Image (cartoon, grey):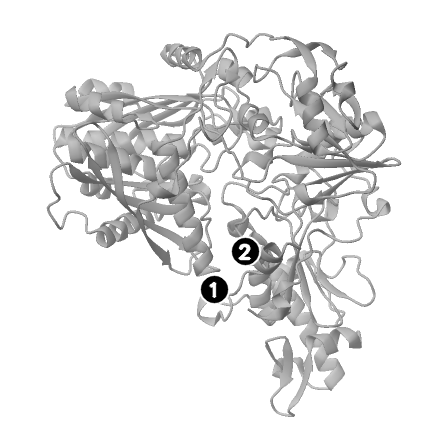
Amino acid sequence: MNKHVNNVAPEATDLSRRSFLVGTAAAGLVLGYAGVPGIGEALAAPSNFEPSVWYAIAPDGFVTVTCGKADMGQHIASTMAQIVAEELGAKWSDMRVQLASNDPKFNDPVLGAQITGGSWSTMMNFEAMSRAGAAGRMALTEGAAAAMGVPASELVVRDSMISHPKSKKAMSFADVVKSGKATKTFTPDELKAIKLKTPDQYTMIGVSVPQLDIPSKTNGTAKYGIDVMLLGMAYGAVVTPPVRFGATVKSVDDSAAKKVPGFIKAVTLDDKTGTTSGWVVAVAGTYANAKKAAQALKIAYDGGPNAKVSSQSLLDEAMRLQKQEDSGQFFVKDGDPAAAFGTAAKVLEAEYTTSINIHAPMEPMNATAEFKGEILHIYSGNQFATRSGAIAAGAAGIDPKFVVMHQMWLGGGFGRRLDADMMIPAVQAAKAIGKPVKVIYTRENDMTMDFSRPLTYQKVKAGVDGDGKLIALSHDVVSAWPTQRWGIPDFLTPSVDKKGPLDSFTVNGADFFYTVPNHHVRAIKNEMAHNATPSGQLRSVAPGWTFWAVESMIDEIAAAAGKDPAQFRISLLDGAGKNDGGAQRLRNTLLAAMGLAGYGTRKLPKGEGMGVACVSSQERATASWTACVAHVAVAPSGEVTVKKLTVATDVGTQVHPDNIRAQVEGAALWGLSLAMYEKATLKDGGIEQTNFDSYTPLRMSQVPEVAIAVIANGEKATGVGEPAVTVIAPAIGNAIFNASGARVRALPITAEAVKGAMKA
């Protein structure tokens, strides 16, 4: 690896007070920050050339790209640099990356808020970063032309060099920057008019270059939130109540804690943001002593309204709500399924459930807070800087413009760090003792207070005609509404029945690309679950449960109609009407997965089977077309062994092939883990699983063979971090049916459930 590749800055530089005391509309959770400077208008040190707010070229020729997305191991910072480098014409060994702060200039009106999720990052940033790179190349070219006295049209840019073949003259990027000749700026309209490279012209995109963050992460210089050290810093350990949400602290006896060396104070959180309830943080000079002090505190609680809620009561409430015809709002309302059911030759109904699931990133949740005069500095890795800054401000009781977020590398996120609960105890403890405070969760804190994937209940009803054609499908989805909890209206979707906004991040995927003339999807909020288990976005979001139901039911329909489930899907992916284009791409991924897996080409031993599923995750408008063939063996006891997962995905334009394959493989294994092993339960208002002995993700010994086919066809780049998660569970469930005749409808899939279904 080139020695120049390891210069990775952990965060944006020069986070001065002045740069953050600017007028914005960022009161509370409003996303309307002031606009960012245009290309060429960003404030820059005289020695640097900054053609964009997103990167700068130093006099030594090094190009530092600022990544406005959270990098949690998916290498998105390197991906942004690779996109810039392609159009800029920079040499890869000259590229550097740093992470953006919450300076309003980084809330780009084109790229949107600083949020990392939904597999959106590459998809939504590719064109803008390409145009930024191209604008820089053009400005450097004009500067070099002026310096060399030659026409700009005759210059060639490659590997950080600008050369004039006719005269043999050449200048490096460093030379042009030092000359001060690069001064061209671009209006937004001029940026849009830039002609970008076509895929056949790429020299950097599509190449598995060394990831820029790996050297610093392996030599220990990359800084994660847990690594932050500030002068005079104290440590906080949180004590959480036995109830997930709704408890309050009645009293705190710190007499025993006062005997712990270095104990400073026990702070009862007064969280006006509503993110936490019933929390106390013990503050001491070291983390070990903070934990000892926390254990020594004697706290009396009022359990609140959710103290008797359980997983069963959440499920019972979901089933009650689904039975009410006026519950929820419609997400899809095409045709008249009820009328079609009346004429159908066959009608099928099924219920599908998923359990509470926990994120559990390896780096414990943490944050460090420091007040410097009027300014609050927060050091933490987070996936939603726009919202997290507002949460920290709310905890401190100050205007968000007085909060400086120092973005750190993330030791795993998966949606967990879209929330900012870890900042609240750090902020309020720092304010209480007048010193910087670092708060680190224990694994037990994080598991019992996770903003988890919600428990879901889905009722699906389908009708087929005499030819076995699917003519109607109704789909009710009942869950907590994680995105509504954020309180950001722009993240909600108007319902098609005009009953008000709904949380589409609980039903995405149910608006599939199959052609069904009569199709209704109803999103129903389980208020009990919403209050008792405040939920978040876990890697895969709604398609992790909606496609479990959709793709399982499609198989059930095919079986009832006596048709091969793969061919049945292909017949439904005809691209009619609104499904034009997308259905064909999904069909192609299914065919690719079937071919790679050898689906239908060989006779399998008794007790073995293959199952298929195909999905358009994350959302319909931002889909990555993904299909899976799962090969399983089912023992008479009901034990399931997943022998192989074959996944095909259409990513449009692939920036970094190795990284794409790694993410797809990791997503598939996460999907396997959710399908077979992970389950959290609620009892007396609290999560029962507290560590990895009771919450049991996939182990290395359980990993099957995984085969990946990536389809790169030059279309717009799509996301890859999550879609493969959503296709695995239904493919496995369908394979179990083909192997044993057992139809399972609850996640995770257990041997007991399979054995029971085999007997049914």
362 relative to 372 in the view: left or right: left
SS for callout 2: helix
Which residue is denoted by mark 2 in the rendering? 126
Whether residue 515 appears in this view of the structure is no
Count of numbered circles on the image: 2
**Residue 137: quadrant of the picture:** bottom right
**Residue 549: quadrant of the picture:** top left
Does residue 241 lie above or below 201 as drawn?
above
**Number of the front mark, 2 or 1:** 1
**Residue 116: quadrant of the picture:** top right
Which residue is denoted by mark 1 in the rendering? 208
Position of residue 296 measured from the top left corner of the image (x, y, whole percent): 69, 18
Position of residue 543 measured from the top left corner of the image (x, y, whole percent): 41, 34
Does residue 436 lie above or below 333 as drawn?
below
Query: Nearest the camera: 225 or 297?
Result: 297
Q: Which is nearer the N-term, disc 2 or disc 1?
A: 2
Quarter that holds the C terminus: top left
Tell which residue pokes out farthest to the bottom in this image: 167
* Structural crowding at the residue carrying mark 1, measured as other residues with C-alpha within 10 Å and reported as few (<14), some (14–19) or many (≥20): some
In the drawing, what numbered circle is on residue 132? none
Q: What amino acid is at disc 1?
A: Ser
Q: Which residue is at a point 66% across and 59% down the rendered structure image?
A: 8
Position of residue 121 measured from the top left corner of the image (x, y, whole percent): 54, 48
SS for callout 1: loop
Does residue 740 lie above or below 227 as drawn?
above
Cα separation, mark 2 vs mark 1, equals 17 Å
